Amino acid sequence: MRTDVHNHTCHFSPDAKMTIDKLISTAVKRNLDIVAVTEHFEYDNPDPNDNIQTFDLKEYSDAFRKWRKLCPPTLQLLQGVEFGYQTHTAEAIDKFAQHKDLDIVLLSNHLFRGVDLFFSKEAYVLSAQDRNREYIAQMAEMAEKVDHFDVAAHFDYVNKFNPNQDEEILYQDCPKEFDRLFEALISKGKALEINTATPVKRHSKPDPEILKRYMQMGGKLFTLGSDAHIPQNLGTAITDFSLYLQSLGIREVCYFKRHRVFMAPLDER
Ligand SMILES: [Zn+2]
Ligand SMILES: [Zn+2]
């Protein structure tokens, strides 16, 4: 089964350029079975120049009802959101995330000391270990404070805009922080996302030690997401990453419908 459960369209995510028509036709072309649209939703975005904010859920649900009718029977479209987490917005996220229309809720940490990593001047003067440790500690807090989410997204976002392409995030950089994050995810039945965007950009794969430790602690739920904002990236490397996960003994990933988890066996089709 081919799943891609992290994507954005231009209809609700201001930084995306993909229309729903393009998303659907590309998903069909790339033999995807399950695709989630997970539009950005940010309370109190600290960047005044960034127009990623919140949107009206009723409008989104209305649009989604129409979008589902555009899909062939071979493609399931899931209605999701990607929340940008901040400590003071945890409660608001938790409340909104419970809405019955939502299939899948991603929680993301896009900020470093209150600034999006895309603009951060502080993050990339630190050592890789200090930066990664601080970022994963914030993700652990996010997973502890919010209850009504399904997936912790892109733990490697911290290095997405790192000018030093050799610096990746490694388990050994911050074992305590990763363990804290995994403990929260596993005890709450939440999934760990394998986001293909950063590794594809760097021609790499996530550190296997991160995934192995998650499984060793009892983690069984992984999702795959290309985080596409343009059609070219939709489903990118899903085959390649499926093979990588299988090489680590992972036989299935998962997706969520109305917050209920469903397992999806990996295949390399
Ligand atoms: Zn994100
Ligand atoms: Zn995203």
Image: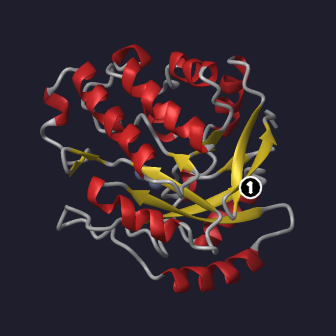
Left/right of residue 236 with respect to residue 266 in the rendered view: left
Residue at the spot x=72%, y=25% of the render?
A: 250
Disc 1: which residue: 34
Q: Quadrant of the N terminus?
A: top right
The percent position of residue 92, horizontal first and vertical second, equals: 38, 68
Residue at the spot x=32%, y=62% of the render?
A: 89
Q: Is residue 140 above or below residue 81?
A: above
Between 133 and 123, the one nearer to me in the picture: 133
**Residue 108 appears in the rendering:** yes
The percent position of residue 176, horizontal first and vertical second, equals: 38, 21
Q: Is residue 120 above or below residue 37?
A: above
Secondary structure type for disc 1? strand
Q: Residues within 10 Å of mark 1 (few under 14, many from 20)?
A: some
Residue at the spot x=56%, y=48% of the render?
A: 151
The image's colour scheme reads secondary structure
Between 217 and 198, the one nearer to me in the picture: 217
Q: Quadrant of the C terminus?
A: top right
The percent position of residue 193, horizontal first and vertical second, equals: 56, 40
The percent position of residue 29, horizontal first and vertical second, equals: 75, 55
- What amino acid type should be assigned to the residue bearing mark 1? Ile
Residue at the spot x=54%, y=55% of the render?
A: 149
Left/right of residue 17 with respect to residue 42 in the rendered view: right
Between 153 and 218, the one nearer to me in the picture: 218
Q: Quadrant of residue 132?
A: top left
